[in-house]
Amino acid sequence: MPEDLPLRTEFSGDMLIEWDMPLTMSDGLALRADIFRPNRPGKFPALLSYGPYGKWLAFQDGYKSAWDYMARFHPDVTAGSSNKFQNWEVVDPEKWVPDGYVCIRIDSRGAGRSPGYLELNSTREIDDLCECIEWAGTRPWSNGKVGLSGISYYAANQWRAAARRPKYLAAICVWEGFVDGYRDATRHGGILCTFAKNWNDMQVKTVQHGVGTRGPVSTLTGEFVCGPDTLSDEELKANRANLWEATQSHPLDNERYRRNLPNLEDIEVPLLSAGNWGGQGLHLRGNIEGFLAAGSPQKWLEMHGGAHWVQYYTDYGVGLQKQFFGHFLKGEANGWDQRPPVLLNIRSPGERFSAREEHEWPLSRTCWTKLYLDPGSLELRATPSDEPRKLEYTALGAGLTFSTVPFEVTTEITGPCAAKLFLSSTTIDADVFLVLRLFAPDGSEVHFFGALDPKVPIAQGWLRASHRKIDPKRSTAHRPYHPHDEKWPLVPREVVELDVEILPTSIVIPPGYRLALTVLGRDYEHQSPPATLSNIRNQMKGCGPFIHDDETDRPISVFGGSYALHFDREKQPYVLLPIITDGQLHANRTK
């Protein structure tokens, strides 16, 4: 087949589709792309995605339970489309091409139909992505403007590509995409998360280029999703980097992570960073940190709730993206540039959300409020206790829970949180898991649909005590920053001071409800039956797949001991909360 021609071209309604178009990279390797474009004369902007999930694997086939949930509870997603071109975490061309966009899906190097060495989140991938942007911006059908779109992996690599400033890149929409591979994704507070291992095994290796006849067949083309060649297990293994081994063997934030960390200040293009309050284990932190640090003078932050893969496809999500891209890729005078820079969907119990525009993050009218942990009553109180006390708990047990009394007035908490603790361990280290929780008047815990888990608490934070070192230049009271560049082992039973980042949240607390902070030495688990998804290996019990159960990282001999929280006049642990309903918390009966 000639190097510049697709596998074949076909028409679907008013859409022209070029299947498996070869895009030759600077090292001579040809990636494979599908091009969906209007079947009419004209110059059009492109929406481009580049990732490892197999562009020919239908959403409905590869992620059946996720698709079924979305189609059942969000019928606007499937309305107005045949849905036969749906693909995991990228746009539905049937909803974009009629509006004058070209949709380009590219299998990343070594994945799906694209040959090559599979190395996730690598510099070579960003080289490829930037070259693909150059290609798209110079086609005869192009208006010279390219936007990047997609969820998760397709979103995360946008930060790094945009920091390179490719010539034809005109806007990016980072929909639930992390920035910092260490802090956001693989080592929460220095604690190894096993999500990357299970994700790689179930969602990436299964569509590696070369799986061939042992892999899925495309319902659209009748060809093999993973290319025409079938390699042995040994050949496949030799043709991919060992992501999990590399993650396991780098417990500190070193060059392995830093080489893939973008210089966010170098981003110039307009950006929309769309985050999820429920994305506590992967993308939430990155969407906010990326928005704050990006150098672009035109940037917007949007925060929503619900399942990780859903809002992007809904009428709400598509409408938001079309207004953004319409303004910056097509020059539409649609009012986007008049929008305030922050759009928050404020949460209330019962999975209710209220959209509200704001002008900054964190909100300038935040009343930063400390609630102190009381060792006698196990309450969260407005004033500290001077009583010398030590509260012990087993690392792998139920931990300690400190709660407010019932709120007397409606109170909103929206923004980043933090906690200060004074802790000792019977061993040379300790893992601290913090969980902000909400309880209804009947004592039942209030959960929300998280990014993947249908029942998550309102916020979480993590810190390995030996990683307690703080970078004072990058820290604020509400967002302590740990460099994770060296270990400070504990002396058994000696007290250390810990500043713990708790990820941003939003919750409107009605009268009669109680807010609680649970301090654990392991992952949070609710008491309801666990949930499952077809693309997730573990049962989900409140943290989704973002759990910390690697035995090499958390040996029982070190992290299975006994911990203690310490209290006295100089040691007054607290949780710092962003109260938006100014002054109302102090009107609450916090004693």
Image (spheres, rainbow, N blue to C red):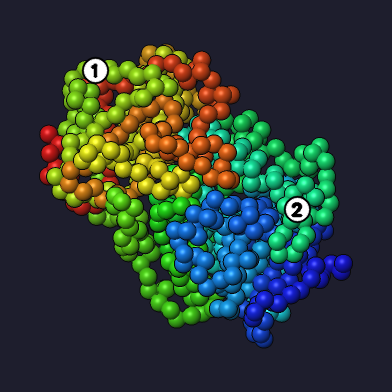
Name which residue lies at 30% across and 34% down: 517
Q: Is residue 418 above or below residue 340?
A: above
Which residue in the protein does label 2 denote?
226
Which amino acid is tagged 2?
A: Cys
Q: Is residue 450 left or right of residue 96?
A: left
Q: Is residue 116 above or below residue 326?
A: above
Name which residue lies at 35% across and 59% down: 344
Residue 389: which disc? Answer: 1
Q: Is residue 233 visible?
A: yes
Total marks shown come to 2
Q: Nearer the viewer, residue 448 or 432?
A: 448
**Percent x, y of residue 251:** 57, 30
Q: Nearer the viewer, residue 467 or 12?
A: 12
- Chain-order first, disc 1 or disc 2: 2
Instruction: Name the residue at the bottom extreme.
Output: 41
| Image quarter in which the N terminus is found | bottom right
